[in-house]
């Protein structure tokens, strides 16, 4: 693991080296469209820095605004917050165990009163990523899942401090620093992801895996895929409007639908601590944990033919069918 600022700086350098013109400090505040429909063509984007404003004409607009998607909302991208989503907080903690070779998760989190929480904790050792400083640190955080039926009534920053207290002795931890929290839009739970010359990637398209909270790889992957679709889109009058949601549905639809369903179950406090021991500590633990890691990380591909893969892929298709039947009005998967 590396601190996020390092990853972002490396990505930015990479883009600049590849020829991107990097302009920082400006916020996109508005878009103009041809015609009244948000499915139309974005003509320009207006940026603001302090009192200064500039309007830039637009060929293709990639919406990579993350979870606070102001421009995306103007283009009709609505995040369906009633569906399962995450709330997470992370910190950096000094510890002499910062070069531990493993990442660690705690799936049975309890708050200060000992009540089971619908969430999980993680410790990612940062090794030399902190620049070789001594003591080395870890990224320590926690996340909780929430739905409109079972909102997570938890202060994740407080839960993080409590979690750090629980593992302090084992990790010889210092105080958590730089605590930050944010929402995680998950499982493609947005009403639309594209118009003729614009498309959403990453968190703006709710591309976070509901079963493990990972969104960085999906953000990178979706941006890379989008670039590959641009030549095809330029050849059709509807541009990205149909191609992009169809691609996201094909790539993530089944797995995300099923993962959202499974994650919704995890919002039931106590469920994990009731069934967890069977999976984590029973005689079948090694096999179950192997399967769980594969399923949670969305590492099953349509080419896999083993029993776990076939069961998961079939369940994914059934889950999408159920979504269409249950949520025709909200069109939860990328506008499906
Ligand atoms: C506490 C926490 C821990 C996490 N840990 C992990 C993890 O370990 N692994 C993992 O894979 N995922 C993790 N995630 C999820 C991951 O952070 C996101 O899924 C990922 O950052 C999404 O990338 P993105 O590029 O879509 O959005 P972001 O990373 O949010 O980037 C969006 C960028 O756009 C900028 N922006 C927004 N609006 C505008 C505007 N109008 N004008 C100009 N700029 C704008 C923002 O400032 C920001 O820099 C975590 C999330 C949280 C909250």
Image: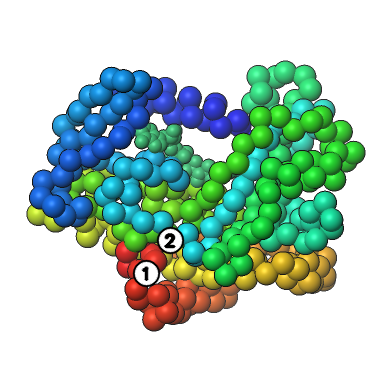
Instruction: State yes or no: Cβ of the residue under disc 1 lies below 8 Å from any atom of ligand 1.
Output: no
Quadrant placement of the N terminus: top right
| Number of the label disc, if any, that sits on residue 330 | 1
Along the polypeptide, which appears first: circle 1 or circle 2?
2
Task: State the residue position of label 2.
Answer: 80
Asked where in the image residue 80 lies, by quadrant, the reply is: bottom left
The answer to whether 274 appears left or right of 144 in the picture is right
Q: Secondary structure at mark 1?
A: loop
Towards the viewer: 77 or 211: 77
Residue drawn at x 28%, y 28% is 47
Q: Is residue 291 visible?
A: no
Display coloring: rainbow
Percent position of residue 242, x then y: 22, 60
Q: CA distance from mark 1 to mark 2?
A: 8 Å
Label 1 with label 2: CB-CB less than 8 Å: yes
The answer to whether 273 appears left or right of 232 in the picture is right
Residue drawn at x 52%, y 50% is 184
Percent position of residue 287, x then y: 71, 67
Quadrant placement of the C terminus: bottom left
């Amino acid at each position: 693991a590396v601190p996020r600022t390092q990853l972002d700086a490396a990505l930015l350098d990479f883009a600049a080296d590849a020829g991107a013109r990097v302009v920082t400090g400006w916020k996109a505040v508005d878009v103009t469209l041809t015609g009244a429909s948000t499915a139309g063509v974005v003509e320009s984007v207006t940026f603001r820095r302090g009192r200064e404003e500039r309007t830039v004409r637009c060929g293709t607009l990639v919406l990579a605004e993350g979870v606070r998607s102001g421009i995306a909302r103007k283009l009709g991208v609505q995040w369906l917050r009633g569906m399962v989503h995450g709330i997470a907080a992370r910190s950096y903690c000094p510890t002499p165990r910062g070069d531990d070779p493993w990442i660690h998760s705690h799936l049975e989190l309890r708050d200060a009163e000992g009540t089971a929480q619908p969430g999980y904790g993680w410790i990612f050792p940062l090794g030399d990523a902190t620049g070789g400083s001594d003591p080395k640190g870890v990224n320590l955080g926690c996340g909780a899942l929430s739905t409109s039926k079972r909102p997570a009534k938890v202060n994740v920053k407080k839960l993080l401090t409590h979690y750090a207290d629980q593992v302090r002795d084992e990790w010889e931890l210092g105080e958590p620093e730089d605590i930050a929290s944010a929402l995680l839009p998950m499982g493609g739970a947005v009403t639309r992801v594209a118009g003729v010359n614009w498309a959403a990637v990453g968190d703006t398209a709710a591309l976070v895996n509901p079963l493990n909270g990972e969104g960085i790889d999906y953000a990178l992957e979706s941006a890379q895929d989008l670039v590959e679709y641009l030549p095809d889109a330029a050849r059709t009058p509807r541009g990205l409007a149909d191609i992009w949601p169809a691609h996201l549905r094909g790539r993530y639809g089944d797995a995300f639908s099923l993962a959202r369903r499974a994650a919704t179950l995890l919002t039931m406090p106590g469920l994990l601590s009731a069934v967890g021991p069977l999976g984590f500590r029973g005689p079948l633990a090694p096999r179950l944990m192997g399967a769980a890691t594969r399923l949670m990380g969305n590492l099953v591909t349509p080419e896999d033919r083993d029993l776990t893969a076939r069961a998961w892929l079939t369940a994914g298709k059934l889950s999408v069918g159920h979504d269409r039947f249950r949520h025709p009005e909200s069109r939860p998967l990328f506008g499906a």
